[in-house]
Image (cartoon, rainbow, N blue to C red):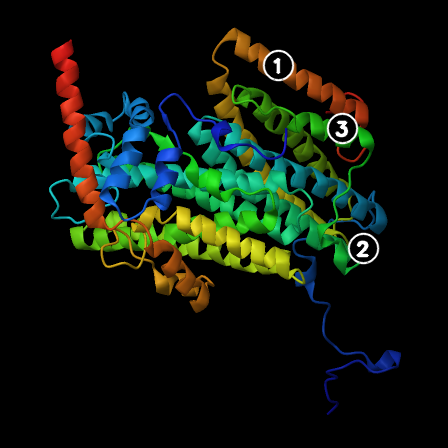
Amino acid sequence: MKRFIAHHELARDSRFVRQDNVAATVLSTLPDDVDKVVEMFDRLTPIIEVSVRGTAAEPLYEEYGPAFGLVTLNEPLRPSDPAVTTRLLLRMHGIFVGELQALEGAGRSLWDFPDAPWEFKMNMARQCWDEARHVQIYEKLLEHCGGTVGMFPESSFLFECACADDPALRVAGVNRGLEGLACDVFRDMIRFAEKSGDEKMQQAIDYVLADELTHVRFGSEWVKEFTKNDPARFEAAQQFRRQVDKQFSFGGSRSDREDAAIRIAREDRIEAGFTEQELDELTEVSSGGPSRETLRKAAEVLRIKHLARKAAAEKQA
Amino acid sequence: MSETRLYPGTGKDERTSFAPYSAFEVPADLRELHGRYDVESMARRIRNFRYAEEWMMMAMGGWVATIPEIPVKTGLGKIIWECAQAADLLGKRLPELRCGRKAVSASESANQGFADFVQAVTEPERPDQTIEKLVGVFDVLKPHLIEVYERTMLETDQIADAPTIEILDEIVRKSRRHVAWAQEVLDRLCDTDARRERRRARAATLRARLIACGGVTGDLAAGSA
């Protein structure tokens, strides 16, 4: 078995549909400019269209066009929202595949770095079991909310962004970037479950969040250990984490901005070993990108263009 | 009145009057001293066992990403952790067997043949090779390890080497569960004659290699794998 695999080599059964990662990655590069957002999504339309075919996202695409993600995932989750079920299922499915990729990332860390210290292997092996349980938990929660595995396309960009070939960068990306994002998302999900009175969801995710803190802690400790006496490598790991944090902020949707869909879970992150300085950096790198108002306006322009294109195509047919 | 002696003195007449405490004999301790392995050879065996557990853990970690069946991915997640715990327990025994404090992470293949066998087990990587992946670990290597661990438990000094027995006993208990899980998975995956043949052929090839190299400890008698 070879060492180091690409994200497109992650094996899936026939229920899954892959989404081109460019759609997820591009959000972190967008400026706060309606025209630029529209232009970018216009360019991505063929890719998005292909990836949603035959999935539960297809009706969303038909209704909202290529920017359906902007009006679903990038909006906060509120029990009173009329579109709450769609948003919840999209998010739940996104978390499910995220946990799957986290399991795969932890597993690959065991195989890709055979000469790593034993304690590192122990931590990664433990993380494999934890992530496997998280996959099982989110599969059940997805069903609990009325969804099914494979109902939405999967983007493997979490694995692509976080799984570096250097173990110091890998733990910085997976254990601090990806698992840090999980802390933010899960704290938000717990709040949602509390508000909607869903005790089953609230309790299950609370346990998952406790595990994630442990995984971030693994990352915090191993970045230090792997980069001991090597300030250049430490800086490279920190730089990589900043880059991953930027990508995982989805253009400010996960940030400390007032209009963020998901806020940074500062207290959880502090408990997991992030320093105040690192959190200030995260606040800074995640706050860029288009505002929610810009995204809403862009989504509306894209929806109108999409409906016009559809009408023209129907007329021609 | 003569005082009851609470503690024996140095002379014959200065013994206490307490009867030998019969509870020590109930139940009778039938264990006998002396086993097949001395400290040094047991330490070597443990390094051999640790090598197998560590490599199984690493291989399954690598496979999780290239196995498409979700319940197999998640099932392996727990087994990876339990193999890591097995390797960890074995490693912690090594300093207790005069291998030095740094020996906790020492793994050693009995010979090049066993190392090559392990590489053959880890070879499959394509997503359509779940059967080949699982057969190597769960139809061949783990059953072999269970057999060797059980024999080691019987053959080693039951009193002097009891800590090793306790560790192996725990590993065997979990390994049996792993094999039973994989048996169900493989029975489900091998649902055609062609797939059953793939399972049989892969197991036969690997078993032959395992026998040829003498198994995990290098001293396996032919025909016993």
Residue type marked 3: Asp
Q: Kindly report which numbered mark, 1 or 3, lies closer to the viewer in this rendering.
A: 3
**1 or 2: tag closer to the N-terminus:** 2
Disc 2 packing (10 Å; few <14; some 14–19; many ≥20): some
- Between residues B14 and B177, which one lies in front from this camera angle? B177
Q: Kindly report which numbered mark, 2 or 3, lies closer to the viewer in this rendering.
A: 3
Q: Chain of mark 1?
A: B
The answer to whether dots 1 and 3 both sit on one chain is yes
Provide the secondary structure element on which disc 3 rests. helix
Residue A194 lies, with reference to residue A113, above or below; the image says below
Looking at the image, can residue B170 be seen?
Answer: no
Residue highlighted by disc 3: B116
Residue A72 lies, with reference to residue A313, above or below; the image says below
Q: Give the x, y percent position of residue A93.
A: 31, 37
> Left or right of A249: which side holds B90?
right
> Left or right of A199: which side holds A46?
right
Q: Quadrant of residue B143?
A: top right
Provide the secondary structure element on which disc 1 rests. helix
Residue highlighted by disc 1: B200
Residue type marked 2: Cys
Residue highlighted by disc 2: B99
Q: Give the x, y percent position of residue A202.
A: 27, 52
Residues at marks 1 and 2, CA–CA distance in whole angstroms: 40 Å
**1 or 3: tag closer to the N-terminus:** 3
